[in-house]
Amino acid sequence: MPRSVNAVASRARRKKVLKQTKGYFGRRKNVWTVAKNTYEKGLGYAYRDRKRKKGQFRALWIQRINAAARIEGVSYSKLMGMMTQKNIEINRKVLADLAVNHPEAFKAVVQKAMAN
């Protein structure tokens, strides 16, 4: 009896990967072994970069807060220290949004943190 290999499912699996590698350059898009390796590598990068994205956004927020704080005459580090002392609990995402879109509200937060 001949060996059954289920060609339909095998081909479907390959087509699924080759469809994902559609825009790649050279053999990466149409040679099964090369495309499969590239696809798997890409999934690894996607997983890693979903984690990295969070840190990159935090760095962006800190830069925005620092720039706005320096306009008010205080550094980011000092501002965050003063906010901790005064128990002002605003996260960096919201603080950065205030700094960019609502400078008067950010200025009020800085004044509150600096008040003796």
Image: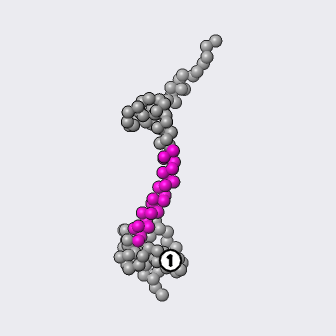
**Which amino acid type is marked by label 1?**
Gly
Measured as percent of width and height from the top left, residue 18 is found at 45, 32
Assign a secondary structure to mark 1.
helix
Q: Residue at x 49, y 34 (%)?
A: 36
Residue 24 lies in the magenta-colored region: no
Say which of 18 and 35 sits in front. 35
What range is drawn magenta here?
44-66
Task: Note whether residue 15 is visible.
Answer: no
Q: Residue at x 50, y 26 (%)?
A: 11
User: Would you place residue 16 above or below residue 55 in this image?
Assistant: above
Measured as percent of width and height from the top left, residue 92 is found at 47, 68
Indicate the quadrant containing the N terminus: top left, top right, bottom left or bottom right: top right
Q: Total number of numbered labels?
A: 1
Measured as percent of width and height from the top left, residue 13 is found at 52, 30
Say which of 26 and 49 sits in front. 26
The residue most toward the bottom is 116
Q: Residue at x 46, y 65 (%)?
A: 93
* Prevailing secondary structure of the magenta residues: helix
Q: Residue at x 49, y 36 (%)?
A: 37
Residue named by callout 1: 81
User: Would you place residue 52 above or below residue 72 in this image?
Assistant: above
Measured as percent of width and height from the top left, residue 115 is found at 46, 85
Judge the density around disc 1: few (<14), some (14-19), many (≥20) Cα neighbours within 10 Å.
Answer: few
Residue 55 lies in the magenta-colored region: yes
The residue most toward the right is 1
User: Would you place residue 5 above or below residue 76 in this image?
Assistant: above
